[in-house]
Amino acid sequence: MNQLAQELNKTLEGTAALELLSELGKRFYFPKGIVAQTMEAAEHAYKFVATVGEAKNKKKPVHLSVIRNFIPGLDPDEIFPYAPTPGIKEFRLLWKEHMIKKNPDLKVKKTSFPLVMPGITTGISIIADMFVDPGDVILIPDLFWGNYRLILEGKKLGTIVTFPFFESNNKLNLKAFEQAIEQNTSRGKLIILLNFPNNPTGYAPLKDEILPLTRVLEKAAGTGLKILMIIDDSYFGLFYEDTIYPQSIFTPLANIHPNILSVKLDGSTKEDFAWGFRVACLTYGGKGLSEEQYTALEQKTKGVMRSTFSNSSKLGQSLLIRALKSTIYQNEKAENIKLLKAKYEKVKAILDHAGNNSLLKPLPFNSGYFMCFELTKGSAEKLRHYLLYEKGIGTISIEDRYLRIAYANVELENIEELYEELFKAAEAVAG
Ligand SMILES: Cc1ncc(COP(=O)(O)O)c(C=O)c1O
């Protein structure tokens, strides 16, 4: 094994993090190659910088005006050069500052410094490289974003095990969660992935669900089980009810038990309505981890990043630095969330008015972009097909049993008509 990897593993000795690492994760390190030498030269080279594969003229990056002219507010240095592998330092600092503002209880907890990824998808893939070996179990509530399967099973040969998301009273099924943990302890290691607000259901846990949920995990960790918690916070902050726990579940988990390592994946994709920018972050939190141990984890992760995408969009990060520093950022975001909340309330009102539809049963939802119907009869794929080809309405069918409606993507004034069509179609397809 490479000497640097051995040193990093030594630093992590005695932590759950080391035991949770995959074979690849154990092997990995950040080489002292071009990137590290370039960073070193940036500090010390006072005469000429002949390091990185970029081109300069008159102290500015060589560039095409045909591109630059479309981005007049930024300096060419903010647009064209590579960003560092872990991300632009100022962006990482600002992201952490905002993360603490959004999750005030994180203030007293130590976490790593966010690493910038080209999207949360990449963050999940990087974490899977770091921690998933073939046959490792990844526990996920039974309604989840389909790409998890492609990454965790398709690429990494892990085994996704699900448990029922909701109880009959429409609350999180913590009993099933606890049982599923108990049934999957044989490797001494368990990976759990939680995504709130959830895709596809649009559910985020309520304030009174957080303590029982964290207690389940604390109890499992107390038996000696090493747990990696992957927290997908893609839709964080799109909360429409006061009853919702207003922080990320990462916050209580970041410092709960030495046997639990948590990783938060969040980003500007949905939070800042910047889907195509490909800017997201990955942050570790684990009870008792020292600065040195966080750095070791970061070095390993940077090695996986360097070997996968090398670095993320400079332009995206530069634009977001400007936004995060702007005084109007919060207000503009609040306005957008208000619009999404109005759509949510419209859907709720329609469903309340419709009463109990015997064909389409809405699953609990209170946040995010989506809601889901469970079909009590017939095929969801058949319904999707009918809606698309007979009515021109696009929806998503899941496991032939659920129909996901991305109501956030539909104009407020069209939501009523959308739901009328959905109900009529369900009747027509059921015959
Ligand atoms: C739950 C969840 N995680 C991750 C993603 C992907 O995020 P990104 O576009 O930042 O890769 C999505 C996008 O639909 C999602 O729904």
Image (cartoon, helix red, strand yellow):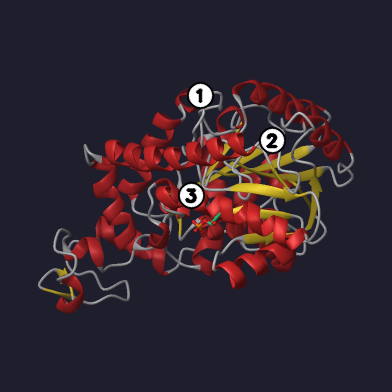
Label 1 element class = loop
**Which residue carries the number 3 mark?**
415
* In the rendered image, the vertical position of residue 389 relative to residue 417, given as above or below: below
Counting from the top left corner in percent of width and height, residue 225 is at 80, 36
Disc 2/disc 3 C-alpha distance (Å): 43 Å
Q: Is residue 329 visible?
A: yes
Please state the quadrant of the image where ligand 1 appears: bottom right
- Give the residue type that dot 3 points to: Ile
Q: Residue at x 59, y 43 (%)?
A: 202
Amino acid carrying mark 2 in the image: Ile
Q: Which residue is mark 2?
A: 260
User: Taking 63 as reference, is 314 left or right?
Assistant: right
Q: How many marks?
A: 3
Return the residue at label 1: 242
Residue at screen point 61% across, 73% down: 389
- Mark 3: secondary structure: helix
- Mark 2 secondary-structure assignment: strand
* Drawn side of residue 267 relative to residue 354, left or right: left
* Contact, mark 2 vs mark 3 (Cβ under 8 Å): no
Vertically, is 61 above or below 247?
Answer: below
